[in-house]
Image (cartoon, rainbow, N blue to C red):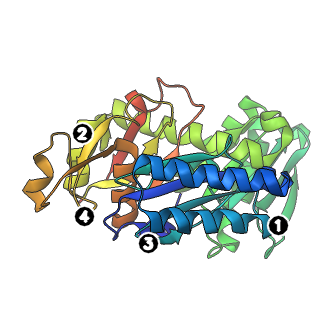
Amino acid sequence: MDLAFLTPLCDRPGPWASVYVDAARHRACTAEERTLESLGVQRALAGAGADEATCHAVRMAFDELRHASEPVGRAIFATGGEVVLDPPLRTAPPGTSVRWAALPHTAPLLDLAGADPLCLVARIDRDGVTLALWPDHRHETERHVPLRAADGWEHGAAEVAEAAEAIVRRQDGTGADLVVLIGDEAECAAVRERLPAALRERALRAGPGAGGGRLDVALPRARAAHEAELFAAARSRGEEAAEGVPALVDAAREHRISQLLIRADGPDAQRPVWVGAEPDQVGVERDEPAVLGARDAVPARADDALLRYAAAAGAEAVSVAGTDPAAGPAGGLGALLRWDG
């Protein structure tokens, strides 16, 4: 996920109110139920120590959801009596959640608000391959390449790989960053092996039945598994990969994180760290942020602290929820690091 939209949250000192709401369910409630829920959110924030102005701002934003037809959900981040950011959610959260903390609780956005990447999708079977960009309503590009059975699958796979490369080349500039192969494992593997090295690194497989055939379900799962596999491969080669809170804190302080990987149910996600006012002022021990100039350090969740750093540094983040824990980072937090430091 590109975290640029979170930058308004990076230069405010906090503390922060973070509210996640199922907007569709909220609109379906009666007026009385909505009022009670709105008051409940306000009281929960006040009980957690939020100032009156911020409690009021959140309640007003919460009340306005009854007029919204979209999205299915919304997050609300507020501090100092102002709603600073209220991004839409593509997936409804499991009920309304309220948090008052030193940092905005942005970690759930990886699973709830992630945008679909622009992908080159190749549906492969014995008859041929259908290639299309997804989701891309600006360039409805589709091409079917028949495979000649008499030539054998191995020869056909080479033709398919060549066709995939040609479409990516012709669509240069559209921003497509993934190639998704849909079909039997052996056939997809044969195609992937014949792709150019640069394209092969951006190719992943989603089985023919993945997500019940729905790309909006299958692609996030396939991409999460792909990212976890890339991380595991880098780790096994001893390359630029880090996992665990101490190593990631060091990487953030050295400005080396390129891509952050988070599994929300991992034990490290909620592990407390200490943060200062600046995104790179983070430490495992309370006195560590002072080394980077922090006047006062306050406790925060590790996932939220690292996401604040990543957003400010222009790094990306990806959820690896639902992937094999052995493939992804131990404890649920990891990163691919920059070579140049």
* Tag 2 near tag 3, CB within 8 Å: no
Note whether 182 is above or below 75 in the view shown. above
- Between disc 1 and disc 3, whose residue precedes? 3
As measured in the structure, the alpha-carbon distance from the residue carrying label 4 to the one carrying label 3 is 13 Å
Q: Which mark is residue 186?
A: none
Residue closer to the observer: 209 or 105 = 105
Q: At label 2, which amino acid type do we have?
A: Ala
- Between disc 2 and disc 3, whose residue precedes? 3
SS at circle 2:
helix
Image location of residue 293, percent across then percent down: 10, 62
| Residue 263 visible (yes or no) | yes
Q: Residue 67 lies in what quarter of the image?
A: bottom right
Image location of residue 308, percent across then percent down: 37, 58
Q: Which residue is mark 3?
A: 8
Note whether 33 is above or below 66 in the view shown. above
Residue closer to the observer: 8 or 237 = 8
Left or right of residue 198: residue 48: left
Q: Which mark is residue 278?
A: 4
SS at circle 4:
loop
SS at circle 3:
helix
* Tag 2 near tag 4, CB within 8 Å: no
SS at circle 1:
loop
Q: Which residue is mark 1?
A: 69
Q: Which residue is mark 2?
A: 247
